[in-house]
Image (cartoon, rainbow, N blue to C red):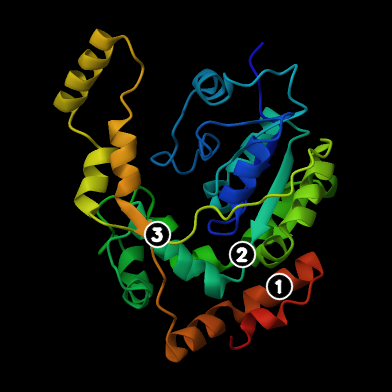
Amino acid sequence: MKSRPDFFIIGAPKCGTTALSEYLREHPRIGFSQPKEPVYFCTDFPRVRNFTEESDYLEQCFGHCRQTDNLAIGEGSTAYFYSTQAVGNILRFDPAARFIIMLRNPLDMIPALHAQKLLSLEEDEPSFETAWSLRQERLTGRRLPKFCMEPSLVDYAALGKLGSHLQRHFQEIPEAQRLVILFDDFARDTRSIYAQVLQFLGVPEDGRTDFPRINESQQLRNPGLYEFGHRPPQTLMRIVNAFKALLGIERLGLLSRLLAWNVRPSQRAPLSDTLRQVLRKEFADDIDSLARLISRDLSHWQQDT
């Protein structure tokens, strides 16, 4: 019998989902998808999906998991948060599925997301302020990044309105099957939030006390090298595969090391006061709605930092 996921991290991007997934992956009684983001259930974003057949999804993402060893098996695809079909598809796949929803102040999340999309070549406008101003043009299909596979996923205003997306998910997901985590809490007391997640998943503590920072801001040394590494010419791939077969090995590891060298830590420039005021106005009502949904005071999200 194939291993099947029973929990899903569907938080918005740049909200700690990668860090949490890596911590959970290392728990001895939890199985986690490889890769982290299969995006299988986003049937409304067909170009973003990594798998379209359930058998491929289960075999390739969870084939390494042993159902008898794991008390919980999960995956984490941030696109599920924005999809209008993913949660419904997941609940049809497993009516008892559990959902971990991670959220963050959109005034911080959206600029961080823009930087991440630059890294993955899903964005080609280096200035966040300019990318923000391109919204109306992009909604009409113009000025879209070359490698953008889903235009709605570069609509930064819509991506930042977390309250509206969460409201939709609350209408679908039974209360007992959902856990909302704020990035503020996760960053401030990772150990406590990790324990809360384990309890939610019905998995015993593993005694973990070390929580290294993961997926910090980075930038490419050479965008062309990134594009080459992630979209290598088919002729080259045939040569590499033939060479691996000749040596009787599964991987050379050269490309992964080259891609790792091609990224370096970076520090994002702070938003201008003018742009921060624009974002504050754009997201004010939605932040208020989110605060009511989760019964938290989020007024500090809209204050000057």
Left or right relative to 233: residue 289: right
Q: Which of label 2 and label 3 is nearer to you?
A: 3
For numbered disc 3, what is the local secondary structure? strand
Hey, what amino acid is under mark 1? Answer: Ser
The N terminus is located in which quarter?
top right
Q: Which residue is mark 2?
A: 162
Q: Is residue 136 above or below residue 63?
A: below
Alpha carbons under labels 2 and 1: distance apart: 9 Å
Residue 122 appears in the picture as rendered: no
Q: Foreground residue, 101 or 158?
A: 101
Residue 150 image position (x, y, % from top left): 39, 50
Q: Foreground residue, 3 or 168?
A: 3
Left or right relative to 36: residue 5: right
Q: Which mark is residue 289?
A: 1
For numbered disc 1, what is the local secondary structure? helix
Hey, what amino acid is under mark 3? Answer: Gln
Report the residue at 75% width, 46% height from top.
Answer: 173
Q: Are there few (<14), some (14-19), or many (20+) residues within 10 Å of tag 3?
A: some
Report the residue at 62% width, 59% height from top.
Answer: 165
Residue 214 appears in the picture as rendered: yes
Left or right relative to 37: residue 291: right
Hey, what amino acid is under mark 2? Answer: Leu
Q: Foreground residue, 41 or 210?
A: 210
Q: Quadrant of residue 2?
A: top right
Sequence-first tag of 1 and 3: 3
Report the residue at 34% width, 14% height from top.
Answer: 249
Q: Are there few (<14), some (14-19), or many (20+) residues within 10 Å of tag 2?
A: many
Q: Which mark is residue 45?
A: none
Q: Is residue 244 above or below residue 51?
A: above
Q: Which of label 1 and label 3 is nearer to you?
A: 3
Q: Which residue is mark 3?
A: 218
Residue 121 image position (x, y, % from top left): 31, 53
